[in-house]
Amino acid sequence: MAAPMQIDSELYEQYDKEWVARALWDPVEYQSFRNNQLRIQRAAIEQFPNSADLIADSQDRINWIEKHTPAGPVFPPSEPIGLTLLAYHCIERLKYSLAHMPFLSESKRVNINAVIRAYRSGSLIPKPGDITYWYAGIQKEDPGPPGQRDEALARWTKEHGEGSMWIESVSVFFFPLRCLSLCAVEERYPTK
C-alpha cells in the first residue's frame, strides 16, 4: 500500500480534491485509473496525428491531469503525519462538507469538528463500514434504529444541552467527478 505524502499548501491547493479523495481511499485503484486516463489521451494523439482539435483537447487533458492530480495519495501540511490513508480520506471528506455545505447547522458543525479532531488525534481510527454517533461534539453509543432514537436523543439533550446528532459513516466518498473534457475546457477557457 502506498504511503501518503505530506505536500506543501500551494501544491495541495492546486490538486483537484475529487482525485485526492480517490487516491486516499484506494491508492492502487487510483494510480491505475490515473495512468489509464493518461494512456487514453496519449493513444488518441498517436492514433489521430492529423486531427489538430483532438490533439489539442487530448494534450489539454494530459496537462490538466499532470498539473491537478497527484501521482499517489497526498495530504496537506495542516494534517498530522502518521495517520492512516482512510483517516486522511475521512478528514478531507469532512473538511469538504464544512466548506461546501452552508446549510449545515452550527450543532452539526460542532460534531463534524469533533470527528475531525478525533481522527487527527488517532482516538478514532476509521475502518470501512464503521459508524459512530456524535452529539454536542461527544462520541455517543448507538442510539438504535431510525425511528426509535427519541429516548437516546432526549437523554443526550438532558446530559449535554441542545444539539443534534451526527452519524459518521466510513464509506467510499468521491466528490462528483467532473468530466475530463470539462476540466480541459476550464483550463483553456476559465469560467472565473
Image (cartoon, grey):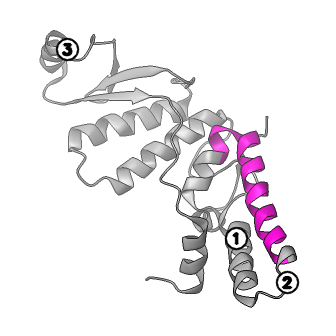
Q: Position of 4 compared to 158: left or right? A: right
Q: Is residue 28 magenta?
A: yes
Front residue of 102/54: it is 54
Q: Which mark is residue 67?
A: 1
Dot 1 amino acid type: Lys
Judge left or right: residue 119 versus residue 19. left
Q: Which residue is mark 3?
A: 149
Q: Secondary structure at mark 3?
A: loop
Query: Which residues lie in the magenta part?
Result: 23-45
Q: Secondary structure at mark 2?
A: loop
Residue at image mark 2: 49
**Up/down of 140 relative to 72, above or below:** above
Quadrant location of residue 148? Answer: top left
Precedes in sequence: disc 1 or disc 2: 2
Q: What is the spatial separation of the Cα atoms under label 1 and label 2, in whole angstroms?
A: 24 Å
Q: Is residue 100 above or below residue 182?
A: above
Three-letter code for the amino acid on which mark 3 is drawn: Arg
Residue 118 placement, left or right of 48: left
Instruction: Using the numbered discs, state the Cα–Cα distance from disc 3 to disc 2 in whole angstroms.
Output: 63 Å
| Residue at image point 40% right, 29% down | 168
Q: Are marks 3 and 2 in contact (CB under 8 Å)?
A: no
In-front residue for pair 5/49: 49
